[in-house]
Amino acid sequence: MSIKTATLNGVATIEIARPEKKNALTAAMYQAMADALRAAQADGAVRAVLITGQPGVFTSGNDIEDFMSRPPSHGMDAPVFQFMFALADCDKPVIAAVTGAAIGIGTTMLLHCDFAYVSDEARLAMPFVGLGLVPEFASSLLLPQLMGQARAAEKLLLGDPFTGADAVEIGLANAVLPAGEVVNHARRVAERFNSLPPGAVREAKKLLRKPQAEAIRQTIQAEAELFAARLRSPEAMEAFQAFFQKRKPDFSKF
Ligand code: COA
């Protein structure tokens, strides 16, 4: 099972567990995470959600094999979009424990979590353009707002990787912690919601998120149309093949 779920002491944990593929996310895994988020939202015993990965890797992003052989359409019922909307619409606090590498959606999902704690060994990156793709999960809207156009361009156009300390500095994460402590720390923050009034937490979270909610929804849809077209582009095919052939892609012919 590559997504493990458990609810303990008011915290619903969603653990990405496919270490042999660096926690790359398949359609089935997105579906399992969407279902788990909706179940957590509906369960009165759950006060907060914790999303975590494996030691050394949070997630290497979308499974590139899936991108090549089963590319998602831009239809919003595809598992990846169900996951995006389940997370963006979750009215309970969501805490991410970024246990290691966080690539692609591994980084963009942090924009939709309420708290993110990052291992001191983690590297984050959004290499969409280098893969022949475009940004997703409303990152094209939210990242420039968070850190300004100049720094967002480094991360979204050049795909420059960055550290947990950088993520804190730009406001994408709360704190950097030693690798062995990140999950426990995130869990302790999640458990703090057991002693807070859930109705007030829910309404406050809604207030924090509502001003952007419609723009986020529209941006996810607009990005998805371009993304679906790019997945089928010769540039993307060259990038995906290069990844599996463990070589640098050659875009000189385009
Ligand atoms: N999709 C499919 N398979 C992936 C994957 C992904 N996103 N990320 C890693 N894997 C696979 C590798 O193909 C490899 O499989 P193999 O053992 O059958 O050869 C295995 O996972 C281990 O990956 P490897 O690259 O050898 O590990 P690493 O420790 O050297 O590097 C990463 C880890 C995460 C930095 C690197 O795997 C990476 O950059 N992955 C792709 C990230 C990416 O571009 N994601 C898409 C974002 S939109």
Image: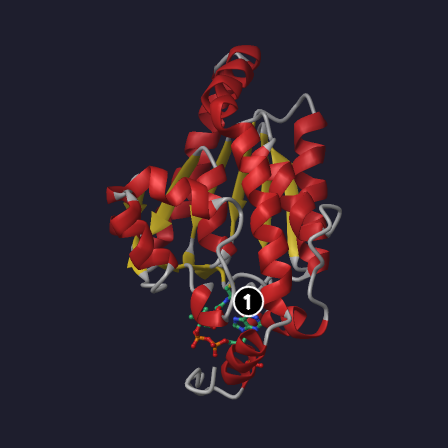
How far across and down, in percent of the image, does residue 20 sit? 57, 72
Q: Which residue in the rendered view is the most extreme toward the front? A: 254
Measured along the vertical axis of the image, is residue 94 above or below residue 81?
above
Residue drawn 38% across the image and 57% down it? 156
How far across and down, in percent of the image, does residue 18 sit? 60, 64
174 lies left or right of 64: left
Q: Which residue is more in the foreground, 207 or 227?
A: 227
Residue drawn 43% across the image and 70% down it? 130
Residue drawn 72% across the image and 42% down it? 35
Q: Which residue is more in the foreground, 52 or 77?
A: 77
Amino acid identity at mark 1: Pro
Q: Quadrant of the N terminus?
A: bottom right
Measured along the vertical axis of the image, is residue 195 above or below residue 183?
above
23 lies left or right of 1: left
Query: Disc 1 marks which residue?
Result: 19
Q: Which residue is more in the foreground, 108 or 98?
A: 108
How far across and down, in percent of the image, does residue 78 sit? 73, 51
